[in-house]
Amino acid sequence: MFACSELYPLIKTGGLADVAYNLPRALVQLGHQVRIVLPAYRGLAEVTPPPQPLCRFEIIGYEVALLVSHVPDTTIPLYLIDCPELFNRPGDPYGDGSHPWPDNALRFGLFCRAVVDLVENHCYGDWLPDIVHCNDWQTGLVPLLLADGAANPATLFTIHNLGYQGLFSQQTLAELGLPEEVKGVPLWDFRALEFYGELSYIKGGIVFADAVNTVSPGYAQEVLTPEFGCGLDGLLRHCGARFTGIVNGIDTDYWSPAKDPDIDLNYSVESLADKQANKRGLLARFHLPDDENTLLLGMVSRLTEQKGIDLLLDALPALLDLPLKVVVLGSGEAQYEQRLLVLAAQHPDRIAFHSGYHEALAHRIIAGVDALLIPSRYEPCGLTQMYSQRYGTVPIAHAVGGLRDTIINACGRAVQGESGGASGGEPWDGVAGTGILFDDYSVAGLQGAVASANKLFQHAMLWSCLQLAGMKQDFSWAASAREYNRLYHRILR
Ligand code: ADP
Ligand code: GLC
């Protein structure tokens, strides 16, 4: 049973939705029987086939219906926890678009309790999962609530982003009718849910799940340090071998330049020159001068501090000293949207910004730009660097977490400031790189990486080596699903 708070194509704010759609499908390929459970947000009752009510139950005074349907375009059963009072709202799963819903503790607490009811009472038939695979803080209370019953399924808790922890008031414990203690530990205790005076949902997963993982080996190492651990590094170190990292994959059919229906002209390693038509189309779409020979940078991202949008905004004026253009697609914090709008208005022939969430445009940008900027402060895995490599678009990224794990740096030595390189002073160390990584998280670091990209871009041969090496990487889900398979078996043993 895969429990999550987002699921592509039904409801998505970020990569979790992509993972929730693709990992279960890859697990089915390995012979697992997977079912998914999700809150019935507004509009989900209209999915095809229409969800059928299976049973009704009451949780802490709320009427809850269990609906069943299928994940679109699959045979995977989808359970929807329907409690209109809490989930039938406008906006995204977590808020009205600007602010988190004030009752998120209740909303996701009730969701967790409903998942547990579903598993313990299996009112949907006699299918009993061996493992409940929980994802992020929204499902953090599930491992806790399943920890005590000997007959209960085992649990895996996957951390997609340690920066979001689900911190609420102590009062929530009583509101949700949670037990006083679990496995002999009082819940309001630093060994359980208490976290510096607040109640932490993510701790429910980390403390009580049979195993815990995050979405890349690199991030799994980083979060053991105070710099990246968001206050939980000590607890994660304490997990020892119970905590591991498994890198995400991507849907290589959906993110395929050879088949993508959203882009202007399909292309592949055999017809890389056709990528250029997508660049022309993109420049025209954004009313930028049709100058194919200058570097076109893109960014497709949530606009939050994590993604380094503030670093890019600070660096942009200096970056414009180079002959390049930038296209940004993103939605998120108003302050960043505002600054992007101002910069785009100041430099209409150099910078374009599309505010909002737009799936097809994300494909067009990733196909049409020469390089994708991913200056994330931290990145548990990241998906767009893998999408971009598939499309022969060179990622320029901060060397952290999953970015470091999935991009082979073409400019190692030069970016570190050492001289030389196989081609005589150029930023190229001769290895089969697939992108450009920078270590120094500063305007100068980003500027250096973009300058290296621009130099490489002037050498058509070197640039196409980089593009082709990226396009040939295998980012399919199969390998990652096999690792999850091994982890599930380890948990069951
Ligand atoms: P995160 O989950 O932290 O946002 P990921 O790189 O794992 O980062 O996943 C982001 C996903 O959301 C990708 O599928 C990316 O294409 C998509 N995405 C982000 N912002 C937008 C946007 N404004 N429009 C369309 N897709 C977006
Ligand atoms: C989170 C992370 C991102 C990761 C995604 C899917 O949103 O920020 O790095 O790729 O989850 O696991």
Image: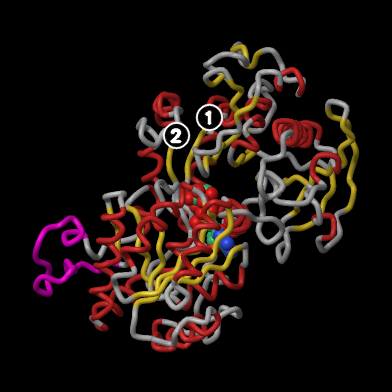
Q: Position of residue 241 (x, y in %)?
A: 41, 31
Position of residue 216 measured from the top left corner of the image (x, y, whole percent): 42, 47
The amino acid on which the numbered mark 2 sits, given as a three-letter code, is: Phe
Is residue 336 shown left or right of residue 186? Answer: left
Name the disc covering residue 243, or none: 2
Q: Is residue 169 left or right of residue 393?
A: right
Q: Nearer the viewer, mark 2 or mark 1?
A: 1
Secondary structure under tag 2 reads strand
Could you tell me if the residues under marks 2 and 1 are in contact, i.e. CB atoms within 8 Å?
yes
Q: Residue 262, which numbered label?
A: none
- Crowd band around label 1 with a 10 angstrom C-alpha radius: few (<14), some (14–19), many (20+): many
Q: Secondary structure at mark 1?
A: helix
- Magenta stretch in the rendered image: 412-433
Q: Which mark is residue 206?
A: 1
Q: Please identify the quadrant where the N terminus is shown.
A: top right
Name which quarter of the figure residue 450 lies in: bottom left
Above/below status of 378 relative to 406: above
- Residue 195: x, y in percent? 54, 21
Q: Is residue 393 left or right of residue 182?
A: left
Magenta residue check for 406: no
| Residue 424 is inside the magenta segment | yes
Q: Main secondary structure of the magenta part?
A: loop
Q: Residue at x 44, y 72 (%)?
A: 347
- Between 111 and 124, the one lying in front of the other is 111
Whole-number angstrom distance, CA of label 2 to CA of label 1:
9 Å
Earlier in the chain: of badge 2 and badge 1, it is 1
Q: Is mark 1 within 8 Å of ligand 2?
A: no
**Residue displayed at 49% across by 66% down:** 328
308 above or below 345? above
